[in-house]
Image: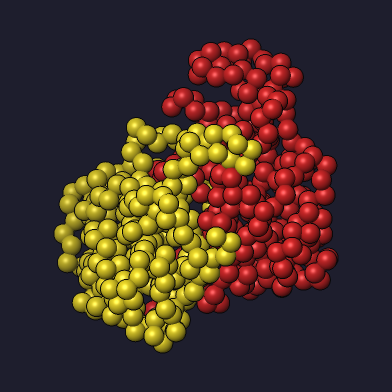
Chain colours: A red, B yellow
Amino acid sequence: MNNIELKALEDFPYVEPGDDLAKIILKSFRINNINLDDGDVVVVAQKIISKSENRYIDLNKITPSEKAITLAKELNRDSSFIQVILNESNEIVSTEKNVIIVEHKLGFININAGIDRSNIPQDINQVLLLPKNPTISANNLRLALSEKFKKQIAVVITDSMTRPYRSGVTNFALASSNLQSLIDLSGEKDMYGNILKNTEIAVADEIAAASGLLMGQGSDKKPVVIIKGFNKNKYKVNDALDLVVSREDDLYR
Amino acid sequence: MNNIELKALEDFPYVEPGDDLAKIILKSFRINNINLDDGDVVVVAQKIISKSENRYIDLNKITPSEKAITLAKELNRDSSFIQVILNESNEIVSTEKNVIIVEHKLGFININAGIDRSNIPQDINQVLLLPKNPTISANNLRLALSEKFKKQIAVVITDSMTRPYRSGVTNFALASSNLQSLIDLSGEKDMYGNILKNTEIAVADEIAAASGLLMGQGSDKKPVVIIKGFNKNKYKVNDALDLVVSREDDLYR
């Protein structure tokens, strides 16, 4: 494996609630002359999954709890927006730096429960939640695409995330289907024959980050990226959602 | 920009202290039929930079301080190794989970100050430090390579790092030369015409993570990856070393 190619689908159409996303992607494949081969990874931005699954929430229809109202006053924010964040979270981790860091119901830690207003229509006062079950979304999409091409492919759903200790966002893997998302090299040898200990590679996050180079965050309209040439078939498949570390196992907490 | 290609140099030779790394890379370019074009990014693993700069430390020649001896007893580790970690660090952040998390002298937070024994010869009791000044290393390498090809290229030096909240390591950017390492989209519009606020992309880390898909961590012998097709010339160049966030500005601390 010495070459990897990333291709972004160009001018991807606007996605609306109820749209059959697999169908839209397949049509865009035809327009962009993309064929899928065994081992290809189709990387999809969370946002178009959420849109097709109608994860919009109209903030004007939210009744904030007392907790949300109190927090909104403290942080000088909209109480309905805070209520939606609370609804999507297991717990608030911190509000110290005037941002709301939570443990999302899906397990990971991020700001505002991954909810933002970018790249959604702002004609009404709405926000877009993450997919309800991104693993199921990834599986369904993989099945629909692989059936069409009769190939063994993988799907990764990505979101962008700020990180402790580092500036800026990178794309990370929200969930995956049929991918070697976390590869454990423990017991293998390095180039000098030393046995590797505790060496795991977060492949799904590296794939997601790579896709971010083409997807962008602005007006790019490139929410789908195909990665060709990545092949780690000898390792076992695992869900990128499981890359989330529990508090006890997190070396940094 | 719809296509990005990553190429790893195959069978990269073993690098020894004092080696002229630019010369070795140029020779490997010839063998691998690689030509550099304007905008290409050459990604280089920290390990071969450190080796060429002879950043080896013989642990048998280290005299551990009292602090190192005390910590070594507490953590059941080798006191000389701990002394080397202390020498490379501004401060210890935590030893709570029986790992030594430090703020490295270069500013970033990681385990064991980025020092490990993988992919170095183990015939003597030695470890390999990070490059003394990775920005200078990146600049020198870029100048040597771009002079040869007469092209505007970029260089990124990568290391692998564990992360809070996430399993496994990913490659991140230790330093860069002539790259749009952190792109600030604030003020630009998204696809619906909404103005983006506080949107920065850690491009250098995404490039580093992408390169990790080919470099691997084991016996791959692929410490150099060329990325073609990435072009963000309209954004300003900044050093990936500056992606490190100060404690005050870190939203998660």
Image x and y of residue A201, in percent: 52, 61
Image point (40%, 36%), residue name = B250
**Residue sitting nearer the eye, A20 or B61:** A20
Image x and y of residue A81, in percent: 63, 23
Image point (37%, 34%), residue name = B249
Is B79 located above or below residue A227 in the figure? above
Image position of A200 (left or right of B107): right
Is A16 located above or below residue B136 in the figure? above
Image position of B87 (left or right of A67): left
Image position of B163 (left or right of B176): right
**Residue sitting nearer the eye, A185 or A151:** A151
**Residue sitting nearer the eye, B240 or A194:** B240
Quadrant of the image for the C terminus of chain B? top left
Q: Name the quadrant containing residue A86.
A: top right
Q: Name the quadrant containing residue B174.
A: bottom left
**Residue sitting nearer the eye, A146 or B177:** B177
Is A163 located above or below residue B26 in the figure? above
Image point (27%, 58%), residue name = B135
Image position of B112 (left or right of A110): left
Image x and y of residue A149, in percent: 80, 69
Quadrant of the image for the N terminus of chain B? bottom right
Image x and y of residue B25, in percent: 34, 78
Q: Is residue A4 visible?
A: yes
Q: Is residue B74 visible?
A: no
Disc tally is 0
Is A222 located above or below residue A185 in the figure? above
Image point (33%, 59%), residue name = B178
